[in-house]
Amino acid sequence: MVNETIKLESKNLNFYYGETQALFNINLQIPKNRVTALIGPSGCGKSTFLRMYNRMNDIIPGTHHKGSILIDSDDIYLEKGSMDIVSLRKKVGMVFQKSNPFPKSIWENIAYGPKIHGIKDNTKLEAIVEKSLRGSALWEEVSDRLHQNAFGLSGGQQQRLCIARALAVEPEILLMDEPASALDPKSTTRIENLIRELRENYTIVIVTHNMQQAARISYYTAFFYEGKLIEFGETEKIFTKPDQQQTEDYITGRFG
């Protein structure tokens, strides 16, 4: 990773659900303003690792970790660190596998986050809503029905709405946990095109089971297996000439 600025980093990271260890000594540097894909079989620790970066695992009783998780060299788990949970989740947006719009209007879905962070001026909120919907390539489709319920949107539109909602608080990082796995091929293509556009301004980490998708949209790929990071590198190399036999076996479909 020559001349790359490191945005996210894990050092000697071990994670536990109670007594069960889910991540084993993960050391990984994720560069700024790149798309990094996390691949591997189900249950290998990809989503658990992803959720470390906005502390979503904290809400699960009995979990704990050892090691460090850093954003811009700041350990986000230090009690006396410079980043509290509210500011962390403003900086680190997340999009889940299943779209989860609020039972509110399209407009309210987008304005909700900025309101929570203290923006009350309606003119400012209007501008944020439009900018966010344009950023998620949804504005042209919904601009004439902003005050209708978001549940009236199609599945693909709802997922782009959730991306717009994440963008509304101006994050620096977007975590995406299988954002297109529940979508039809056409909607999946739109999400992938959107990710390509967003990578100019955001650091994006995406969990995907779809290796073709990882190959299409990511610059770097990390291969996880049974809670361990097996290999990390430029996506083209991982998919064409990996260093580890285990990586090659997974890429070529020999297991997984």
Image (tube, helix red, strand yellow):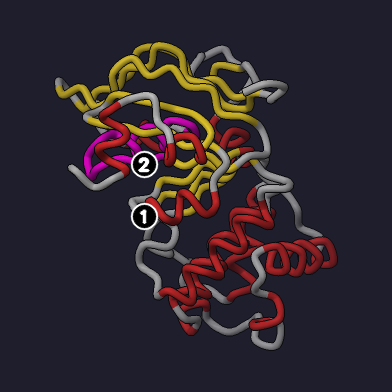
Residue that numbered label 2 is attached to: 39
**Left or right position of 219 against 52:** right
Kindly identify the residue that appears in the image at 48 percent across and 53 percent down.
95
Q: Magenta region: which residues?
A: 38-54
> Residue at image x 39%, y 50%?
208
Instruction: Name the residue type under label 1.
Output: Asn
Judge whether residue 232 is colored magenta: no
Q: Residue furthest left?
A: 19
Decide if residue 25 is in sight here.
Answer: yes
Instruction: Look at the image and tell me whether residue 115 can be seen.
Output: no
Q: Residues within 10 Å of mark 2 (few under 14, many from 20)?
A: many
Q: Secondary structure at mark 2?
A: strand
Q: Quadrant of residue 65?
A: top left
Q: Position of residue 206 (x, y in %)?
A: 47, 46
For mark 1, give the secondary structure: loop
Name the one closer to the observer, 235 or 186.
235
- Residue at 24% across, 47% down: 253
Q: Give whichever of 254, 125 is nearer the camera.
A: 254
x then y, percent, for residue 104:
52, 73
